[in-house]
Image (tube, rainbow, N blue to C red):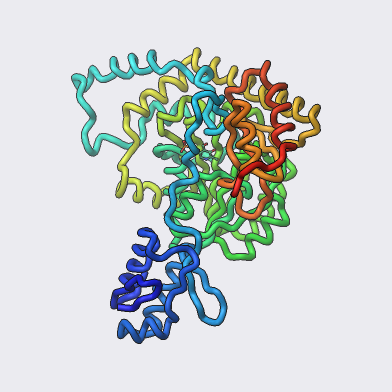
Amino acid sequence: VSRTSDYPIRGDGATDIAAAIETGIVAGSLAAGARLPTVRDLATDLGVSPTTVANAYRSLRERGLLTANGRGGTSVTAMRPRSARRVAPPIPPHALDLARGNPDPQLLPDLRPALAAVADGLASTAGRSRKYGDGGNLPALVAALEPRLAADGLPIAPVTMVNGALDGVELALRTVVHPGDSVVVEDPGYCGLLDLLESLGLRAIPVATDDEGPLPDALTAALARRPVAAVLTPRAQNPTGAAWSSSRATELEAVLATQPQLLVIEDDPLAEVADEPLRDITAAGRDRWAYVRTLSKTLGPDLRVAALLADPTTNARVAALQQATTGWVSWLVQHLAAFLLDDADAERTRTEARRRYGERRTVFKEKLKEHGVGARGISGYNVWIPVSHEASTVQALLTYGWAVRAGEVFRLESPPGLRVTVAELPLEQAGLLAADVASAMAAPRRNISA
Ligand SMILES: Cc1ncc(COP(=O)(O)O)c(C=O)c1O
């Protein structure tokens, strides 16, 4: 047993020692900044080889829990297995929720006719559930999706239904990654993805972006850092609302072509309700690629269903992993999704959603411009507003009755900003919100410590 900061570290193998340290971090006994014994001291105390301790420290460094601080010292970072970035702070009852990234419920299809049709469809099993071994992809859902995917220029490849976009991204990543590996992400990028990488023990390599997507030079520099995968968003990027222009897509494709073995995952979050076409770069004959299309924003977040396309190797590994874990996506959900994709009313709702989201975003940005506030966002329903002080601006906006998301959860190295989800912003309030953003940005920072 070795004591530093009064915390006993035990163990006779690297895994036990790392677990003991992690337990201390989680319990708060090893606080941020606490220094750990040197490798040699701990090895002597525990009667193990220095290599064993070094391996334990390395695995925790790779997960971001420890940092080396020169002259062989090691200390605890501020990072601990933390509550997910994806979980937004509670919205006070008086505030309009422009923070949680939701689609407008009015622009989602009514689920009741779909539920009634699914209930009727259970006649063949006398109303009982399907059995183990009956699952897999629902052919009717795959048939509803295939022409849409083909119309977007995606490669012809087997479709695998997964439980939402992040499930698909996780399955695809797990076909290639090991803890400590690096994955290229957009910066700012989707907070749920950053959580996922952290939970898998992966490092994020940030790539700066503009309205047209990742900057090619930044991507080139990121590839030099030996990532095993890249997760990129072709349109309706979260949080910045970027969409790849065709010239940018061509440039990105060329940069990525230098590493054909790198797994490139395209996450297309809004798909049919995004007002830019898909400019896919996976079709260009990469060895390793995956494309994930969630139905969360087109049909409703609670359906938890997405389609995944991938090269044959990735696809086979994804199928094996899925069989080893969730097994399949509930056929009840797949039936609902198939009904809604084929339904004419639901299709009209999607067309309307695309138009409305584009209108709300465009009008809000124009109003911001009238107040001298610059903003990003050309696709989907998120607008990104660069600000100097996130916390104080978010707080001031809350006092005016608007809940927006501080950019911190989306950022690695990029400068501060706010994400405003305009999906439910009434057009007639866009001017008022813009004026309030301008004054919140100008307000002095009051009593805000972070
Ligand atoms: C880029 C991106 N990926 C994934 C998701 C999550 O999708 P799902 O609900 O299908 O897991 C979101 C949701 O906002 C997103 O914006």
User: x and y percent of residue 169 in the render?
Assistant: 47, 46
Farthest residue, direction front: 447
Reply above or below: 64 against 325: below
User: x and y percent of residue 442 in the render?
Assistant: 75, 37
Res 233 → quadrant: top right
Depth order, front residue of 398/339: 398
* Residue drawn at the location 31% of the way across and 43% of the way down: 326
Residue 282 in view in this figure: no
Q: With 386 as the anchor, is 381 left or right in this view?
A: left
Quarter of the image where the N terminus is located: bottom left
Q: With 33 as the anchor, is 211 left or right in this view?
A: right
Q: With 163 as the anchor, is 213 left or right in this view?
A: right
User: x and y percent of residue 28 in the render?
Assistant: 39, 60
Marks counted in the figure total 0
Depth order, front residue of 75/245: 75
Residue 14 in view in this figure: yes
Reply above or below: 227 against 240: below
Reply above or below: 169 against 140: below
Q: With 63 as the anchor, is 448 left or right in this view?
A: right
* Residue drawn at the location 40% of the way across and 39% of the way down: 162
Depth order, front residue of 170/284: 170
User: x and y percent of residue 293 in the render?
Assistant: 51, 36
Res 405 → quadrant: top right
* Residue drawn at the location 37% of the way across and 47% of the way down: 319
Depth order, front residue of 205/271: 205
* Residue drawn at the location 44% of the way across and 16% of the way down: 110
Reply above or below: 17 against 40: above
